[in-house]
Image: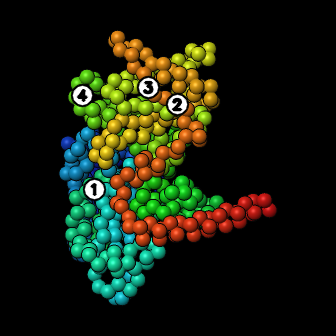
Amino acid sequence: MFNKRIPKSSHQQRFKKEAPDSKEELFIDLDEKHHLEKVFKANSIFEKLIPTARERAEQGLPSMRHVKEHGYSICSQFGDVSIQDQDQEYYHLSLMVGLGVDIFSTKEGHLHPARITLVTTQLKYLFHQKVKPEGHILNYHQDLTGLDSHAMSDVTCTRQEMVKKLVKLISTSTIMFSFDPAEHLHLMKVVHFRIIDLRMLFEKDLELGLEIDRMSLVRRYLPDEFVSQSEAIQAIALALRYYSAYQWRCNVAKNQNVPLYPMLPAHMIEEDSIASKQRLITTIHRILAWKYRAYYIRPPTPVLIGPMVIRVHVKKWGQLRRIVDFIADLSAHIRQVLHIKLEGDDHHEEFRLISLPISMKSKAQMKGFFCYIHFEDEERARIAVEYFDGGKTIQGELVRYKCEVYDDTRAIPKQGSLMFRSAPKQSKQESVAQENHRMELRKSYDIISRAESTKRLD
């Protein structure tokens, strides 16, 4: 179904200017070369999976010919958008987005985009726009789009207006993920060279006799709550799951220390120079995420919970300033209590995974963050709780943290507090319809699971 790819030897090849109609000539800017190198390194395996000119032609993706002959639009240049906010680039890293296009069928015999959605790697909506229909709608496909004539009655944004907004939000360096790139780009009338077909990432499943359509992949690789989410969220979540699996394998098999999620390097700075608590929260959070990048997980990975998981509350100013040192000394403290001696220069951590969900005071203001730390056994978790709860005296000031074992007897945090925070509100009618659709999908999934179990037993 998909052609075998020839891996590129280095991401630096992308700075070569090739023949006309190549993706390289559209976003090269030598002044941004250093930043591009960091971004390409963060993109990791995805840089090798971007389709070449020949593959774009085979897949039917739009090219510069469509811009010249059919009036297609192309995205903004790299420096215009993606680095305008240096403080936010580490968090949103909108150089990767999931693309979703809801589709109507018209009486004139063609398809029309009903709603365009872009979602960042933080599972937040970057763009969510309904499009005014052109012509007469034959089928709203309400079971898939959740839209009907009433929902579209007050839409005034035309396809041309939608495209103008969309191309300003992403750059020519952005990697887009879609379940059907050719159809989606042609429907939007947009040319974008750095777009990856999600089905190509899981083509190995075909060799195992597994389906690689959208819902099959979502049910197989994502938590249950993603079944009812939009296509764009499912796309970026599957891309992140693939990225995490690839990076984890590099860490285990090749003894590397690469992040499990796309992120740019963070460097230690003097916290005393930070006057804003909001900036302190984002800075410390970024430092911890990068320092423990080989252990750090976040959605779509499920929340850490169990008797071997502790939760540390990091909200006060003094706690924020000292948490990096506290976690850095945690493994040494556990080894000292358990009388464990390391051989050679092995300085591995005594915990397995770490998660750092942000705690919000309001929609626009952060309160702090939590540290969920997963250990090998309950004894290590108990020692860690005593370590954080007892605290330390640093420069004459006692710094302590509220800390507890986060087992299944405690209330599980709402998923909305950790993911999908900026998802648009849905009407009750849409929520009920989606819930009914989700229940039907679960029943189908249970039947398939039982059938597969029966086959394995046979």
Please, which residue is most extreme toward the top here?
396
Quick one: label 4, few (<14), some, or many (20+) residues within 10 Å? few
For mark 4, what is the residue? 274
For mark 3, what is the residue? 401
Rendered image: mark on residue 170:
1
Q: Name the spot of residue 272 as percent of width and height, x first.
A: 25, 22
- In the visual, does 71 lie left or right of 307? left
Query: Vertically, is 298 above or below 130?
Result: above
Of residue 435 and residue 138, the one placed in the foreground of this image is 435
Single out the mark in the foreground, 2 or 1: 2
State how far apart marks 3 and 1 are (Cα): 40 Å
Give the structural element (helix, strand or loop) at label 4.
Answer: loop
Quick one: label 2, few (<14), some, or many (20+) residues within 10 Å? many
For mark 2, what is the residue? 404
Query: Vertically, is 220 above or below 36?
Result: below
Single out the mark in the foreground, 4 or 1: 4
* Quadrant containing the C terminus in the rendered view: bottom right
Quick one: label 3, few (<14), some, or many (20+) residues within 10 Å? many
Q: Earlier in the sequence, mark 4 or mark 1?
A: 1
Residue 290: in sight, yes or no? no
Query: Residue type at mark 1?
Result: Ile
Q: Residue at x 45, y 19 (%)?
A: 391
User: Disc 4 vs disc 2: Cβ atoms closer than 8 Å?
Assistant: no
State how far apart marks 4 and 1 are (Cα): 30 Å
Quick one: label 1, few (<14), some, or many (20+) residues within 10 Å? many
